[in-house]
Amino acid sequence: MGTAKLVVLGSINADHILNIEQFPQPGETVRGNHYQVAFGGKGANQAVAAGRSGADITFIACVGDDSIGQNIKKQLETDSIHIECIDAVKNETTGVALIFVNQQGENVIGIHAGANAHLTTERVNHYQQKIIDADAVLMQLESPIEAVQLAAEIAQKNNTKVILNPAPAQALPDSLLSLVDIITPNETEAEHLTGIAVNDDHGAQAAAQALHDKGISKVIITLGARGVWFSEKGKLGKIIAGFKVKAVDTIAAGDTFNGAYVTALLEGKNDTQAVRFAHAAAAIAVTRAGAQPSVPWRNEIDTFLTQQE
């Protein structure tokens, strides 16, 4: 039996980040004091987390036919990701997020989907063999919802596990939720999906139960610094605590968690071990700045876990 195969289907963005003292008023120009372009997008962040933590991963995604798209593909290849299913879309730009960050660390963001909007059902059909051959498919909600739905349908018919990170928060049809094996919302996303506020363990259990009732066997609600609420259908849920570290920035912490968790699961770790592994990856990520630059490699995660024992 070879290494278990993972497919990540999702978005790729170039994040243009400008640090300024305060946000400009309409018609006003303000000077920035730090500018960087970082590669982001939930799909890409999770693919990078899986690749660096040791998964055999193929990424289905779209970039524009621009130089930034070419650069991102090259970078993803160095992150141990199979890139043959990343299409460059003619006459389209790579997805972008334009981010202003003020002195208080607050941000305002404008997003253009660009090539991400071209991750259509036709493309999913074109690459369906990858999903059929995979052991698991990991998805988020920055891609067209009908593509996510179709990929989940193909996966379910072929015994490929479906893991959905339902971010950014939105309501989802039961037709999609019923195809999901494992869902990983944060508190806000869990409330969006169930209408139940997750303010304490009681709320977490109730929200998890509502998702189990829609047909999902495992629910992992991420609770930031507290860790996660882990619930398996028919069993009592519980908190699996995270690791205490000094956070620099929490960008991509959730994405790192998702990519690392699925990697550990495919290696045959049990749920608690897989969550601990993912907690370790996320803990390292929050001690570093940026999205993809902060994502740790396998040896770093293993070392971190050894030090915790």
Image: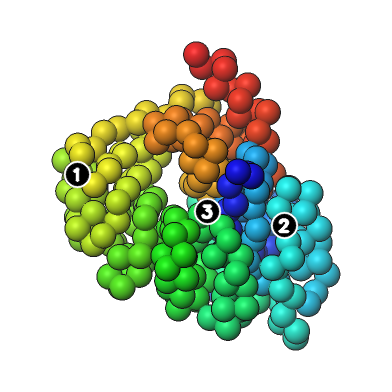
- Say which quarter of the image contains residue 205: top left
- Given residues 47 and 134, the one toward you in this image is 134
Q: First in sequence: mark 1 or mark 2?
A: 2
Q: How is the image coloured?
A: rainbow
Mark 3 and mark 1: Cα distance apart in space: 24 Å
- Type of amino acid under label 2: His
| Label drawn at residue 234 | 1
Q: Residue 232: horizontal and vertical position, in percent? A: 27, 43
Mark 2 falls on what kind of element?
strand
Mark 3 falls on what kind of element?
loop
Instruction: Tell me whether the residue at label 3 lies in contact with that at label 1, contact meaning CB atoms closer than 8 angstroms.
Output: no
Instruction: Tell me whether the residue at label 3 lies in contact with that at label 2, contact meaning CB atoms closer than 8 angstroms.
Output: no
Q: First in sequence: mark 3 or mark 2?
A: 2
Q: Residue 152: horizontal and vertical position, in percent? A: 44, 67
Q: Residue 26: horizontal and vertical position, in percent? A: 55, 74
For marks 3 and 1, give the one nearer the viewer: 3
- Type of amino acid under label 1: Gly
Q: Is residue 171 left or right of residue 270?
A: left
Q: Is residue 5 left or right of residue 205?
A: right
- Given residues 71 and 298, the one toward you in this image is 298
Mark 1 and mark 2: Cα distance apart in space: 37 Å
For marks 3 and 2, give the one nearer the viewer: 3
- Given residues 80 and 255, the one toward you in this image is 80
Residue at label 2?
82
Mark 1 falls on what kind of element?
loop
- Say which quarter of the image contains residue 299: top right
Q: Is residue 192 left or right of residue 150?
A: left
Mark 3 and mark 2: Cα distance apart in space: 15 Å
Q: Residue at x 54, y 38 (%)?
A: 267
Within 10 Å of disc 2 (Cα), the crowding (few <14, some 14-19, many 20+) is some
Residue at label 3?
135
